[in-house]
């Protein structure tokens, strides 16, 4: 998998921005985040890039753990 999230969750005090997201995006697949303001799109991307730590769950990008290897994830994705 190019991008994988398992139970990815982000809480800000009582507000849950992303709630147990499971996602698999393979090589050559396209994926678009659509949703209203406050739906958790940016928060999800920030967790997958290692810019913010998930409250629960994990994210992997290009075989790297996003939380642990965020700098390398950003380097490889051009962020």
Image (spheres, rainbow, N blue to C red):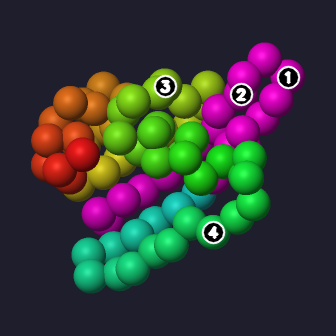
Q: Identify which residue, 55 or 77, lies in the foreground.
A: 77
As helix, strand or loop, the secondary structure at mark 2 comes to strand
Check residue 22 for magenta coloring.
Answer: no
Q: Residue drawn at (78%, 35%), measured in percent from left and top? A: 16
Does label 2 or label 4 sit earlier along the sequence?
2
Q: Which residue is mark 1?
A: 14
Q: Which residue is mark 2?
A: 11
Residue 48 has which mark? none
Residue 59 visible in the snapshot: no
Check residue 15 for magenta coloring.
Answer: yes
Distance in Å between CA atoms under marks 2 and 4: 20 Å
Q: Residues at badges 2 and 4 in contact (C-beta under 8 Å)?
A: no
Q: Which residue is mark 4?
A: 34
Density class for disc 3 (Cα within 10 Å; few <14, some 14-19, many ≥20) is many
Distance in Å between CA atoms under marks 2 and 3: 10 Å
Of the two numbered discs 4 and 3 in the rendering, the one whose residue sits closer to the viewer: 4
Tell me where the magenta segment starts and ends, as one range: 1-21
């Amino acid at each position: 998998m190019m991008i994988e999230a398992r139970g990815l969750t982000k809480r800000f005090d009582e507000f849950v921005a992303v709630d147990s997201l499971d996602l698999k995006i393979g090589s050559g697949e396209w994926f678009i985040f659509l949703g209203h303001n406050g739906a958790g799109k940016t928060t999800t991307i920030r967790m997958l890039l290692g810019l913010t730590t998930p409250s629960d769950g994990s994210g992997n990008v290009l075989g790297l753990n996003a939380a642990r290897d965020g700098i390398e994830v950003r380097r490889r994705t051009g962020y």
